[in-house]
Image (cartoon, helix red, strand yellow):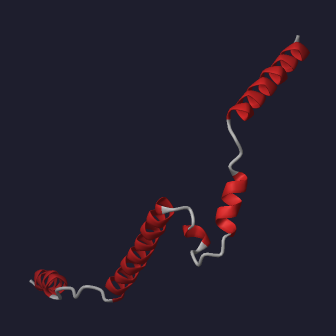
Amino acid sequence: MLWNLLALHQIIQTTIITASHAKFESKVPEKQKMFQEDNGILVHLKGGIADAVLYRATMILTVGGMAYAIYQLVVASFPKKQDWLQFILPAISFIQLSVD
């Protein structure tokens, strides 16, 4: 019974794979020609407008993230000045209470 199910699975899988290959033409040779042209465009931008938009968005996010990280490092390296009175006044009042 198990062998029959496995054989059926393989037949269905083969049918689906061959049916999907029959519908589509291979665009690989066209893409190879496009990417191998020596036209001065960077390889990661040869895909067209979509690649250019993704490249610019990536660069903006990278530079923005680096700027924000540097800003946070600067903020963390200069801690806020604390009001000394909030620490001194309770200590002074405690000393006065214990003396009385």
Q: Is residue 90 left or right of residue 6?
A: left
Q: Is residue 36 left or right of residue 97?
A: right
Residue at x 45% of width, y 73% of height? 59
- Residue 18 versus residue 42 in the image, above or below: above
Q: Is residue 74 left or right of residue 50?
A: left
Viewer-side residue, 42 vs 92: 42
Residue at x 44% of width, y 64% of height? 53
Q: Position of residue 14 (x, y in %)?
A: 81, 27
Q: Position of residue 8 (x, y in %)?
A: 83, 17
**Quarter of the figure with the C terminus:** bottom left
- Residue 7 versus residue 35 in the image, above or below: above
Viewer-side residue, 94 vs 98: 94
Q: Which image quarter: residue 72?
A: bottom left
Q: Position of residue 9 (x, y in %)?
A: 80, 21
- Residue 93 versus residue 18 in the image, above or below: below
Residue at x 11% of width, y 80% of height? 97
